[in-house]
Image (spheres, coloured by chain):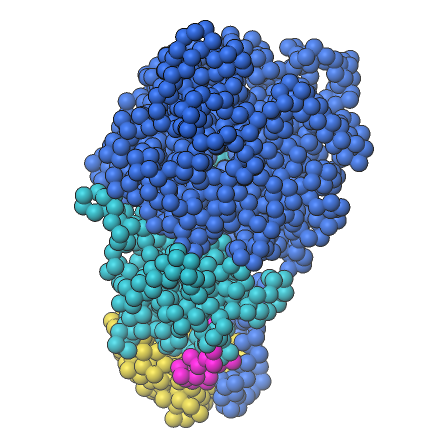
Chain colours: A blue, B yellow, C cyan
Amino acid sequence: MDERVKTGAAANGASTVDAGRRNFLKGSGGLGLSLSLPSFATALAPGFVGEALAGTKVPAYAKWEDIYRNEWKWDKVTWGSHLNICWPQGSCKFYVYVRNGIVWREEQAAQTAACNADYVDYNPLGCQKGAAFNNNLYGDERIKYPLKRVGERGEGKWKRVSWDEATADIADAIIDGLESQGSDAFILDSPHVHAGSVANSGGYRMTYLLDGVSPDNNVDIGDTYTGAFHTFGKMHMGYSADNLLDSELIFMTCSNWSYTYPTGYHFMTEARYKGAEVVVVAPDFNPTTPGADIHVPVKVGRDAAFWLGLCQVMIDEKLIDRQFVSEQTDLPLLVRSDTGKFLSAADVDGGHAKQFYVIDEKTRALRQAPRGTLRQDGPVALEGTFSAKLHDGKTVEVRPVFQLMKDQLDKEFTPEKASAKSGAPVSLIRELGRKVAKKRTLSYIGFTAAKSYHGDLFERSMYLAMALSGNWGKPGTGFYSWAYAEDNMFFLAVMNKPTAQGGMNEMAEMQKSFHERLKKEDPTSTDEMADIEFTKAVTVAMGAVPPAMWLYNHAGYDQLYNNKAWADPSLKTTFGGYLKEAIDKGWWTKDHLRPAPDKTPQVYMMISHNPIRRKRSGAKLYPEVLFPKLKMIFAMEVRMSSSAMYADIVLPCAWYYEKHEITTPCSGNPFFTFVDRAVAPPGECKEEWEGMALILKKVGERAKARGLTEFTDHYGKKRRYDELYSKFVMDGHLLTNEDCVKEMVQINVAADVFPKGYTYEKLRKEGQVKFTSLGQSVAKYACGNEYDPNKPFFPLRWHVDDRKVYPTHTRRAQFYFDHDWYLEAGEALPTHKDPPMMGGDHPFQITGGHPRVSIHSAHLTNAHLSRLHRGQPVMHMNDHDAVALGIKDGEMAKVFNDFASCQIMVRTAPNIQPKQCVVYFWEAYQYKDWKPYDILLLGIPKALHLAGGYEQFRYYYLNGSPAPATDRGVRVSIEKA
Amino acid sequence: MKAKRIDASNDALLDAASPVWAGAEGESVSMAPTPLMLVKEVSPFLALSQDHGAVTSLRAAALHNGGMLAIRLQWAAPKHDRIVDLDSFVDGAAVMFPVVRGAPAATMGARGKPTNAWYWKANTPAPYEVVAEGFASVQRLAGRSDLKAAAHYRDGQWNLVLGRSLGKADGLVKLEAGGSTKIAFAVWSGGNSERSGRKSFSGEFVDFEILK
Amino acid sequence: MAYVPGGSKKELRKADRQLATVIDLNKCLGCQTCSVACKNLWTKRPGTEHMRWANVTTYPGKGYPRDYEKKGGGFRDGEPQPGKIPSVIDSGDNFQFNHNEVYYEGKGQSVRLHPVSNVTGKEPEWGYNWDEDQGGGQWPNPYFFYFARMCNHCTKPACLEACPTGAIFKREKDGIVLIDQDRCKGHRHCVEACPYKAVYFNPVAQKSEKCILCFPRIDKGIANACNRQCTGRVRAFGYLDDRDSQVHKLVAKWKVALPLHAEYGTGPNVFYVPPMGARGFGSDGEITDGSRIPLDVLEGLFGPEVRRVLDVLRTERAKMKAGQGSELMDILISKKWTDRFGGFTNDPLTQS
């Protein structure tokens, strides 16, 4: 067992045990403390014995204590963090301890103060992964030298090559792609930010310069709250973790903080001690639930019915906040009974198509709902049936959305019916409906909502409950912890020159021009709307595209998306059918459909990202369909991922503590944290930024050698090969990570994210800075509240206090979509639909998500962390289900559906709901034949999300478009392997 | 027991199978479990031990060559010479001498009446010396003697020779040709979780003569 | 220094003051940051790899080391009880992995990265935290909570009583129980005697080792690693007699923190705030007001005081809900994290 020798703690070799029979001492330190008696000294009287046995041994005590004291020693301590790997939760400030040139340990600095003395502070802030990260630096998964594939892809046969040789191969492949078919040959597959803020910007900057394509990371991984995006016209509306303390009722749903937000978990338990009730809504009694008061055991994929039951109770028992509902939402807007469309001024007097109406409660007459403000001119009717006279002379029946909603709730979602649909007990639906209405309520809805086929319905139903009870835009309310100021990454990717030379001004000017243009077109529009338009333009320039179409056209996902047996039966056609209609209607253009269907991706770049792990069914479809098309797959990696195993070239990169970096935080923990270069990276690892610059330099060199000077981008414009490098490094301004961090500090100062006058030197000294605002990019508007560092942060205040309108079709939080597709599909109102039979007619539904001791796949294969659990993939299933299948805890099971199968160890537990099975993910190569559970997951996007031509049905960077990651509730069968 | 002087090299003495040992007067020593009531003070938990003293008899013999005294111990036992798990123990043996007259063997000496013992453990290459004024004050002493051990396990039997130079003392028992002292023996059966006071013991000291 | 010739147990267990820890099971999220913090600092040395001085497991479950509650030791009615020594596998094993084989040996998909037991060289059947998240009860009323443990630094340590060589002693100044690594002969009577199985044998050094309560940190005024690094803010630490410390207030004043298995008779100095638990469902499937964690389960761990403690927690929480405030809840919340550490608040930047 060679590998055990290689992975041993030390190489001294033990001599005291039979290593052949038992291995547990193998590789340990030998008989360090053994005693021997080499020689006989001078004679000594028996009195010596007494002395030897008496108090004279005191010095020896001090000596043995040194065994331990010597562990508490180091050469230096620097600042560290773990870059954006857990974006909403991260930015933890760590001390990094270096001894003999090695990072020996790390410990939370614990200097993240409370916003003010009335609130809980963030300390110690840092989890098990962070506290053990040094083990990753020196783990066996670390890549230290450039590798070139010499066997088949995925075979694991490599040759060590130089950076020069590796980058030349990559450069030639990039040039080949550009020369053979223009721009759509280079793909940066949705890099995750965990390579670092600099590396992330670098990846996009490189793609931008090469006119490459990058399937949108955030949409690709299903971190898009489509329900929010459609209801509010935006989704990045986070709060700070201490906002929980202002709440009286906290829902934790579609999430599992115990695993995914360990650093924030205490805010939940402390809010509970402060008097708040904590409710976990989840199919299983999940690992967060021990800290809760109530578990709502919804059936997998049936959350919407639970929330709608609460809504029915609130309306039925007349507990709703009428004022809030009237102003904030579209619920008072009138809908024509004949068409199902909003009654608009175009109908009534030939006016604006998006001018909608309400009924004045006193006069019972039609009144225009203001478009430039949420404020209503007096009370409006929520209930009733009315008639409206149209300018063509017709009279039509109209009803407020509220009335439609109420009718639907009374018909389908009484507590009894909601209970039958959702699995939540009737008594809980009643109790919680009443409580939501009366209490300051906050929810944390995690990305399981975004990863459930009808997750948008979960969300819309939950927002409806919050709307009816007036629970947003106030302290202690909100939906999730995911607001950010990422100006440093966003702008570094696309700026043409340094901030000091006006680079940011240039961007600001561009942004301003969008604002001015839109205001001119529509004086009731808001800066938020203009900013969305600006972001759309930048998105196109960056080459970010909706990922579902890329997968559909190029990676073989059409066979999944168009499978009728697995589709939502209420849809009129296949995904492909909807896509065609959407393209025909111009909702999706060639800017979105990249690479174009008639082009072939050729060069595929990965930056610390692992599609074989995370692409649903990717471990099957990528090697079978996508990879054979690719002429070059290369990975800039720190560790050997399942995806890197398939690469043609692996470039070794510097990991945390080995490069200057800065985290880019979210509002869950609003601190930017500096990461110092505590040690040099091992072997030939380089900063990603430097590696990318080398590639682009090589592209210039190889083009020159091949007699080429320019290529044509997808706008038809010429770009010069020999300018790529100098543009990337801004003419030598950005050569190293440290240069980039310095620039990022300036960007953040220019964007008001950092205090005025803040410097790199100050950041380096203090290690951390709290954001002062949410910056100048989209997040600022999405949150709809100014950031006050001295208070907990909550979103949407501008809308509630200032009555600022939402960037939606109706300018209100919108619960009724009069879009044809939604009307046809019966989803105009928030409703419940059983999840489609994705994967076929199989009895179990699989759920899952992030594991406890790894963030994404970064820590999955680290030996140190893998010893904190069974060290291999496990599937949790209900103990009675297991008995029925004849499977015992610890045995292997075959899990399969119509598409694929895998083998996995079973862990039985009473806390898993019957007919549910739970897998927290693992690396593909941890499974037999490298067939991970992920290949069962399909990830079929909701075809309705291809809808366009409606204000909030749109795509821009990180937002919108169908998410090809809807894996929760996929159907499987299980049998003993 | 008597240690005869013979003309043999140290290496020959340290070889339990050497023909030189044919000239030694071996004795069969009867071994018994240590009475653990004696250790209740120092470890009431140890005093709970039962079923120790798996080895019930021992053959002991002694020789010297004028320079080194060698004591050969032989006993039948299953072999346990490795720590294979946290609850495993190894075979061992010891010979003990009083440092001053009147030191009690059963308690490994007493305050002011120390004993000196030679220890051998099957997983440790070198034997070591201890002095003790009772169970709780056993002190390992390094660097005070040239104590050597040679052990072979053959046909279900341990064959162990412990040897140390005559004459020198340095706080340890003084052993000289032509003198006499007392001796006692202990054996630990690793397979029976024997260690510390859990052992087989030969009982009170018996006379030990080192012939000229 | 408490070493006494002849090993007078009375002298060895003498302590002028006692450091104590309170672990709040309502806040513990099972994240293992404490166990990682400890392992990274103390038990990566040869022979210590299997040890988890600080550990967290799921309760109900077999605990760590496996089935420690069934392995004897401690005292009953003052009388010492025989005990067993956990095996390496009981103690968590130390899985080994075949990274190089998977990555570099050209075997492709015919091999998978997997653990093997460091003891048997085969697929492991048990290891540290093996029964994580399994818990007890029956659907729809499953229940579990996370249980963080460490050496209890007992007032009457069974390990100390058991050591025939006088190697185990309490530090006089703070009651930390230590094993003198020079005197220890690896006999493991301490391992048998400790009813919590918090002493571990180092087969390389052939000595026993255990939690040292991070004394090199404590000596510099820095809270110990498991307590300070606990991201759930679960733990309070300090001198039991320090009336300003949270441990004193929780243990002595509010009496809401209870020792684990007090019946083992060792006088443990780690105390637990018992879990309130989520509400259970009745036989009709509807919600009830009672906790789903059976009271007898908690009493089995923390004794008959549990009921009273849960009542106190409920009452004080209701006061908070009603806006009346509660000193107890304020302590359990600890707005200022540093308040948790009884004055051991120095940054971990002073080395030995």
In this rendering, the answer to whether C25 lies above or below C151 is: above
Predominant secondary structure, magenta span: loop
- Residue A528's x, y, as percent? 60, 29
Q: Residue at x 42, y 25 (%)?
A: A363
Camera-nearest residue between A902 and C217: C217
In this rendering, the answer to whether A805 lies above or below B80 is: above
Camera-nearest residue between A202 and B73: A202
- Residue C230's x, y, as percent? 49, 56
Q: Is residue A749 visible?
A: yes
Question: Residue A571 occupies which quadrant of the picture?
Answer: top left
In this rendering, the answer to whether A48 lies above or below B57 is: below
Count of residue discs: 0
In the current view of this chain or complex, which residue is farthest to the front? A363
Residue C12 shown in magenta: yes
Residue C86 shown in magenta: no
- Residue B108's x, y, as percent? 38, 84
Q: Residue at x 36, y 66 (%)?
A: C256
In this rendering, the answer to whether A619 lies above or below C113 is: above
Q: Residue at x 52, y 85 (%)?
A: A55
Q: Residue at x 54, y 63 (%)?
A: C338
Q: Would you say C349 lies left or right of B96 here?
A: right
- Residue A488's x, y, as percent? 67, 36
Q: Is residue C184 visible?
A: no
Camera-nearest residue between A323 and A578: A323
Which image quadrant: the C terminus of chain C? Answer: bottom right
In the current view of this chain or complex, which residue is farthest to the left? C283
**Magenta-highlighted residues:** C1-19
Question: Residue A703 occupies which quadrant of the picture?
Answer: top right
